[in-house]
Amino acid sequence: HEIVNIKRTSELAVVQARQAAAKATEAIRKKKMEEKKVALKSKIADAMAAGPAAEQFVISAESLVEPFIKGASKSEAEMLELAKKVDEALEVARTNVDQATKDMKTPISPDGEEHEEDELLKKDIAAFVAAETKRPTIRLGQYKNRIQRCATIVGRYRKELRDVHNRSIFDGLKAELVAKVKGGKVSTEAFAKVDPLILEAEKGVEPFPRHAKLTFSEMQIMGDRVSEKIEAAKVAVEELRQEICPIDPNLDDDLKRKLRLAAQPHIKQPLLRLGQIERRLARTIKLLAIFRGDAQSRCASQKQSVRGIVVRVLSKHMATSGQDAAALFVQAAGGASTLGKDAFIALFDVMDKSVKKVGSNEEEQVELSPEDLDSLFVSCLANGAKELSKDAFQQLTIQRMKVSKATTLTTVLSIAEGKLLRALRVGETLDALEGPIKEDKTGVMRMHVKATKDGKEGWATLAGNAGTIFLKDIDA
């Protein structure tokens, strides 16, 4: 009986302790939230400051649109000139409203509250920001609607003007076009000129389905050649279309459509043959687009694969030589602040290409051709740069992983002895710091990683004993 009482007293003490801890945590959270509210209000006020200024630009544009609403007695030339001014004013208003909207969406700094680890506090912050920015956000949406209304009014005026102009000239153009197509006859030579060009384009796309063994460069060259043939065929088809139905290409699109409809009954046979040619051309264009997409996928895959090999080769070299990435960069660049392409390629000539397989302790011999390294070098350059920066080079020494199945991040290599740091969610990216290393008790391969999301470092399992893959090499 005494043991039961002691057990109940202990359990009650644990419950009370947990309740006290929860209350203390809640009090700390509330205090922290009040502190953050002060800072957030200041940031939100700064973000809202652009709203009134943006409205003034909207009002200015609306004042220019008034003559289009009231039908002011101005000449057509004056109204068209005013329409241009409205376009400029609307562009300025649109830019300012978009900027104000962007400012409103990001009142929290990138290195601030959104990296808060307390999930409940993060939700409170998000709810507070949403409530504080709701009214001004709605107002900015109204500004956008007012801008669109102005654009619609001016656009309607221009359309009505075009319709009036088109009606005034349509009858004359129609009579002239019908007389031409009735009296004229499309020569067989015109079709004979187009057919070989279409055939050339079709022959060009024939090998596309058999591109499995082609490199990206080979696919690119093949695609460019076919593209030239298709462009030549396009020009010939357009010339043929103009010969069949000679309409001034500078006319309004709606007017051209009406003229084609008027001429159609008189050129049925040529149009049928033209339609067949256009369908053949459209097929080659579609096949080229698919081929280009496959080529880009092949390029991305090759770059990722090469990068994965480079990471493993560099990692092994640094481990055996005792150099870190910074020292290796200084050596390769000869003391310069950037690394040239030739020096980058030459760096790998002296390195051991026998490296561990991904997720295993077994080694394999890998190859890095100058072309592969050239392509990787170019892909790592910053915009406009011709040489590799130190930071970009150091990124090449980091193996990147992606969580493919939810798992955990723990403090040490041993699963039994490690403490849980946090869950790793599907899609998260990680930088590999060490490993893979076999965990003695379970026999699974583990890696020391750093989460790019929050900088947390710990150990994670590559794959379970049953074959479940938790982490995948992004560049593999």
Image (cartoon, rainbow, N blue to C red):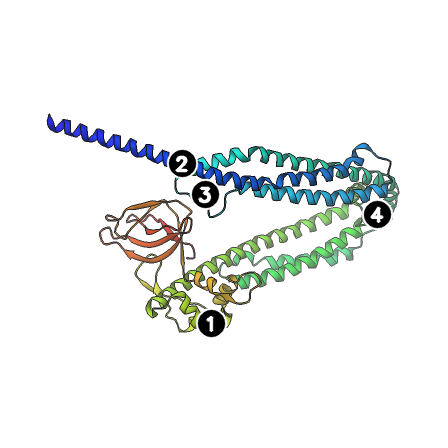
Q: Nearer the viewer, mark 2 or mark 1?
A: 2
Disc on the earlier residue, 1 or 4: 4
SS under mark 4: helix
The span from disc 3 to disc 2 (Cα, nearest Å) is 15 Å
Single out the mark in the foreground, 3 or 2. 2
Quadrant occupied by the N terminus: top left
Q: Nearer the viewer, residue 34 or 468?
A: 34
Mark 1–mark 4 CB contact (< 8 Å): no
Residue position for label 3:
113
Q: Residue at x 62, y 34 (%)?
A: 139
Q: Does dot 2 land on a helix, a strand or a loop?
A: helix
Rendered view: 474 above or below 52: below
Dot 1 or dot 3, earlier in sequence: 3
Q: Amino acid at mark 4?
A: Val
Provide the residue designation for mark 2: 31
**Does residue 278 appear to the left or right of 132 in the view shown?**
right
Secondary element at image label 3: helix
For label 4, the crowd category at 10 Å Cα-Cα, with few meaning under 14, some 14 to 19 and many 20 or more, is some
Residue that carries the numbered disc 1 in the rendered image: 333
Q: Please state the horizontal and vertical placement of residue 25, each as a whole percent of the image.
A: 34, 36
Q: Amino acid at mark 2?
A: Lys
